[in-house]
Image: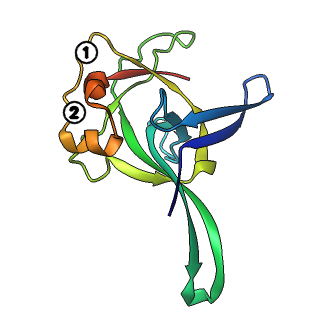
């Protein structure tokens, strides 16, 4: 396993231009947006997550006799869950997506993502009407937060895409 601190995400802007997001793990915003892959009409089209680690592995697959190591990039992410919001507004005004952290004791709170499935980075703005969340010691250790930054997590966020 080889660890990295920077990930570059290439994407196409809304006016069909090439752009690139550079994400530094542990510095500022590390939030990403992916297609959900859910087919239901009721499901939300995007998943949101925070990048915790970037790494690559060189793998060989012995049952298929592939002896040459193959390079695989991997992102370790902490998932954000969609909050139910009132979407009774008109088609012209849709509320911002609201998300919150998946509980740290849930086995699906963290996962692995292929960097090629990331659409682009996103910016999370705290829902100031909610209060800061209490972060457990195990989550702080995994996220490598400084002691002074422990109270940076909020219960809910708005997603700025």
- Going 22% across and 16% down the picture, which residue do you hit? 131
Q: Quadrant of residue 65?
A: bottom right
Q: Which part of the image, by quadrant, shows the C terminus?
A: top right
In x, y percent, where is residue 68? 67, 80
| Vertical comparison of 73 with 98: above or below | below
Residue nearest the viewer, comparing 3 with 78: 3
Question: x%, y% of residue 124?
Answer: 45, 23
Q: Is mark 2 on a helix, strand or loop?
A: loop
* Residue 57 located left or right of residue 68: left
Where is mark 1, residue-wise?
130
Q: How crowded is mark 2: few (under 14 residues within 10 Å), some or many (20 or more)?
A: some
Look at the picture and state if 49 lies above or below 133.
below
The residue at the point 63 percent across, 66 percent down is 71
Residue under label 2: 135
Question: x, y (%) of residue 27?
Answer: 48, 30
State the residue lying farthest toward the right: 17
Can residue 43 be seen by looking at this rendering?
no
User: Which sits in the foreground, 26 or 121?
Assistant: 26
Q: Residue at x 59, y 49 (%)?
A: 115
Front residue (pair 28, 119): 28
Q: Which of 85 and 26 is in front in this view?
A: 26
Residue 85 placement (x, y as % from top left): 35, 21
Q: Which residue is drawn at 50% across and 15% down?
A: 94
Q: Quadrant of residue 26?
A: top left
Q: In this view, does 69 lie above or below 100?
A: below
Q: Classify 10 Å Cα crowding around label 1: few (below 14), some (14-19), many (20 and above).
A: few
Between circles 2 and 1, the one closer to the viewer is: 2
Tag shown at residue 99: none
């Amino acid at each position: 396993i080889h660890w990295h601190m920077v990930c570059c995400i290439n994407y196409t802007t809304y006016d069909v231009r090439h752009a690139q997001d550079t994400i530094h793990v542990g510095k500022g915003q590390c939030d990403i947006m992916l297609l959900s892959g859910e087919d239901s009409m009721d499901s939300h089209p995007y998943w949101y997550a925070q990048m915790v680690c970037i790494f690559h592995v060189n793998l060989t697959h012995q049952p298929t006799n592939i002896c040459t190591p193959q390079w695989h990039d991997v992102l370790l992410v902490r998932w954000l869950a969609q909050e139910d919001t009132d979407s009774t507004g008109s088609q012209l005004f849709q509320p911002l997506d609201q998300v919150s952290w998946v509980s740290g004791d849930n086995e699906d709170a963290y996962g692995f993502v292929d960097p090629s499935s990331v659409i682009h980075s996103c910016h999370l703005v705290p829902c100031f009407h909610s209060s800061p969340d209490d972060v457990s010691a195990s989550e702080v250790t995994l996220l490598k937060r400084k002691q002074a930054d422990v109270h940076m997590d909020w219960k809910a966020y708005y997603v700025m895409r």
